[in-house]
Image (cartoon, rainbow, N blue to C red):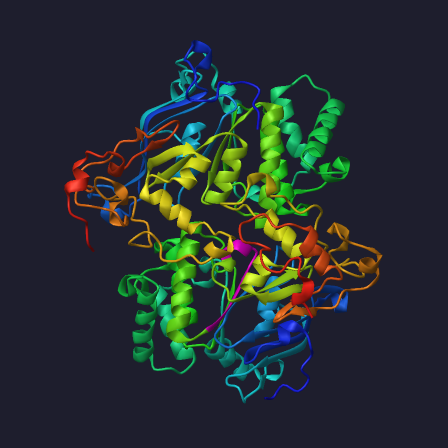
Amino acid sequence: MSRPDATAGTDDSTDSADEPLISLENVEVHFEKEQGLLDLFEEPDVVRAVDGVSLDIQENDVLVLVGESGCGKTTLGKTMIGLQRPTGGSVKYRGRDIWETKAGNTDLSFDEIRSSLQIIHQDPGSSLNPNRRIVEILSEPIRLTHPGVSAGERRERIYSLLERVGMTPAHDFADRYPHQLSGGEKQRVALSRALLMNPDVILADEAISALDVSLRVEMMDLMLDLQDDFNTSFVFVSHDLSNARYFAEHGDGRVGVMYLGNLVEVGPAERLISEPQHPYTEVLRWATPNLALDATEAGEPPMRKIDIPDPINPPSGCRFHTRCPKARTACPKEQPELETHGDRHLVACFRSDEDHEYWDSPEIED
Amino acid sequence: MTIESQQLTGADEVEDPILEIKNASVTYDGGDTHVLNDVTFSIERDEIVGVVGESGSGKSMLASAMLDAIPAPGRLSGEILYHPDEDTTIDVLNLSDEELRSYRWADVSMVFQGAMSSFNPTMKVGSHFKDTLRAHDEDVSEGMDFARQLLSDLYLDPERVLDSYPHELSGGMQQRALIALSMLLEPEVLVMDEPTAALDLLMQRSILMLLEDLKEKYEVTMVFITHDLPLVASLADRMAVLYAFELVEAGPRDQIIGQSGHPYTRALLNSTPNIDAPLEDMKPIPGKSPAPVNVPDGCSYADRCPLASEECTAFDPEFQLIEDEHSVACHHWEQARAEIALNFAGADEIGVSKGGDSR
């Protein structure tokens, strides 16, 4: 897919116009687990949802975050768009710290940031007010962004957008209530509402996971078409590597693999899938069904344990070492850094360093 | 054999059926609304069948029909025959309430989507196992030993799981505990309706692998019902495809994936995000499936089908055998194979052009 500008690549020369849209530096999000009265005098349990993530999002960029439930991908996505306050590190929007802006300490208004960063959820039903018609739901963002627009013109814009997202006849859909729509239609309304805010970034949080498999390609195509029309970036959160591949490849973006709060591999989708460097990426590859007849049977999974460890006390060193089939005694000792492995490809595994002490240490056996 | 009225429909042609569904229909509103329409399908002893259908295709109705558990006020007609062994036939729709209660756990057991709604949140997981044993007059301590065995077969720590409340377990653990519970009375058949849908892909695939192990170990026949065709394709021996409340295709897994004859099955395969297929070949299916109140005359898929002819809108295609064990309800299945290319490796390599495979 061709792109109107070239700012999205990470390999561009850096002049000030190429300042990233969103910039995360060493972000951590830790939650204190709720405690009962009896635990009052004990140290609170801390859930380490996101730890030490640094990442940039450019204009018109596509970033897909993949990983299993509990890996922190949704928390990281929400942190990127200012819905979740990080407990460490910084999140910047066009060079301004989002949370400093909220406190009134920058030259930008927080409202501007809020409308620039939008989200669509996995379950669109719960994010649409059941007592309001679609036309009313979609009028709100126009009123916010264009207070001078007349009711007639608002309606016109809504109709044309509904048609654009494939909901025809638009006047018919506009007068319906959310419960009169299918799951896919609700998701289109949620997407339309986000787009009416003229956002720079839309976080699509498992936005297609609840749809039938056969409807997912259509929804992803629509999001990517609209990305071109509206000039937005997408952060797409998914647990499904084949969806990640489709979205990232069509949007010429990157896939970031998360495991227990860390980014463990980042790269272009096809490279990540054809030459996974991190053993956890191989696990996700195994988990992805394949219709090619010689590959339909799954075989044994390339991991030692089925369940993800508790994020309250994540394993030391490389957090994947408790499940990794290639783990050696060097792995629990220190945490591997995310390092460059070829063009636009980053990986956090000692195995990508030929000289690492990993290679001389014995295998871990259960 | 106790089956006399053997119809020559392919799905009926299994050698040793454990469960036979004959002309099953489910209607609401005094017969005006069909949510399952004349489905005939047999399940072979010790196989894993994958039943694929999109939302609103009637797949959950088919699952409920197998247990005579259609939600009121729905009406189930047709026949459901259960064969505990080759020479015995139980007519499920004529069982007494007491017999049905036993049938639903000890003969044919069911796992639903979303373990959270199947477990009572105020009861520990272990109590669910004990209550089930008591309700069926089973020896509790013996039964709990078996429960622990099942839980560890499913890679769970039995003591921890039994002593936990459902919400204290992850979604994947809950769903595995529910599968263990459904196996507690050693059923012959396990019917699962979207048993992994709310879980991430890694957990889904892990559970599929465990189901395969369970099947081998306890010789249980499995029916896995889902919208996710590629997922169940990795597990199933045979597959059946539902569209608009009817069975449109059934056959061995490799035939359904590699040489499907129904245009809908082929469109469904091509619409699936796939990890290897060329990206530009993945295409959505145009149009929508019909609502239960206005299923069209003739073939229900005709208005979305690129091959539809006058014949299709006039005559409902019969569900017919096109080759060994492979049945399709389509007037143009040969044309479908020739003209609707599949987008993944290995498909259609055998026998597309040589229609000679067919009868």
Q: In the visual, does B235 lie left or right of A327?
A: right
Residue A206 visible in the picture: no
Q: Quick one: quadrant of the C terminus of chain B?
A: bottom right
x and y, in percent, of residue B54 in the image: 61, 55
Residue located 57% across and 25% down the image: A2
Q: Quadrant of the N terminus of chain B?
A: bottom right
| B186 relative to B230, above or below | below
Q: Position of residue B304 (x, y in %)?
A: 74, 50
Where does the image place residue A57, in percent across and percent down from the top left? 44, 24
Where on the picture, by quarter, is residue B157?
bottom left
In reply to whether residue B299 is colored magenta, the answer given is no
Q: Nearest the camera: A318 or B277?
A: B277
The mark tally for this picture is 0
* Left or right: where B342 falls relative to A40: right
Q: Nearer the viewer, residue A130 or B199?
A: B199
Q: Which residues are magenta?
A: B221-231
* The one of B254 and B56 positioned closer to us in this rendering: B254
Image point (32%, 75%), residue name:
B146
Residue B186 picture quarter? bottom left
A353 is higher (above) or lower (below) than A210 = above
Asked whether residue B196 appears in the rendered view, the answer is yes
**Residue nearer the viewer, A263 or A8:** A8
Above/below status of B105 relative to A38: below
Residue A269 x %, y %:
45, 36
Q: Which residue does the image show at 47% across and 75% down from the upper left?
A: B46
